[in-house]
Image: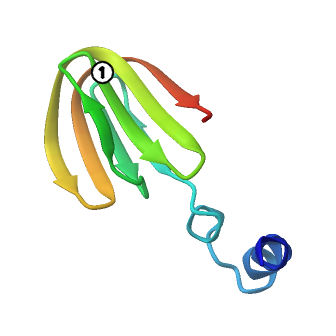
Amino acid sequence: MKNIQQRIRPLLIKYLALPSDVVLELPRITVIGQIHAYIENHKGLALFTDEELRLRATKGYIQIKGSSFVLKMMLPEEILLEGTITDIRFISE
């Protein structure tokens, strides 16, 4: 079943002009300077402190480090983070 999905997804992206982040279940991260990060299509909150945010993703975690973090908005698949961002990493499982 996974093999079929792996073959179909590129075709959906190419011929139906569907966004690759949606079809491939990839997170979308929009960063504004060092003060805001808007993360879409995550799989849940794993860790939050005033210096680190870790979100579950399809293939691991998204880790954001910095200082003075505040969650300005949190929806099931969207988060708006405010603070001083110094590092963004993707961590494989």
Please provide percent x and percent y for residue 19.
Answer: 61, 70
The answer to whether 42 appears left or right of 25 in the picture is: left
The answer to whether 46 appears left or right of 2 in the picture is: left
Provide the secondary structure element on which disc 1 rests. strand
Instruction: Say which residue label 1 marks.
Output: 52
| Color encoding of the figure | rainbow
The answer to whether 59 appears left or right of 64 in the picture is: right
Q: Quadrant of residue 22?
A: bottom right
Q: Quadrant of residue 71?
A: top left
Spot the residue most to the front: 1
Please provide percent x and percent y for residue 25.
Answer: 57, 62
Please provide percent x and percent y for residue 13.
Answer: 74, 75
Give the residue at x 43% y 28%.
63
Q: Quadrant of the C terminus?
A: top right
The answer to whether 32 appears left or right of 71 in the picture is: right
Q: Is residue 17 positioned above or below 37 on the image?
A: below
Q: Given the image, on which type of amino acid does mark 1 rest?
A: Glu
Q: Quadrant of the N terminus?
A: bottom right
Total numbered labels placed on residues in the image = 1
Give the residue at x 53% y 26%.
89
Q: Is residue 54 positioned above or below 24 on the image?
A: above
Q: Residues within 10 Å of mark 1 (few under 14, many from 20)?
A: some
Q: Is residue 86 positioned above or below 14 on the image?
A: above
Please provide percent x and percent y for residue 56.
Answer: 43, 44
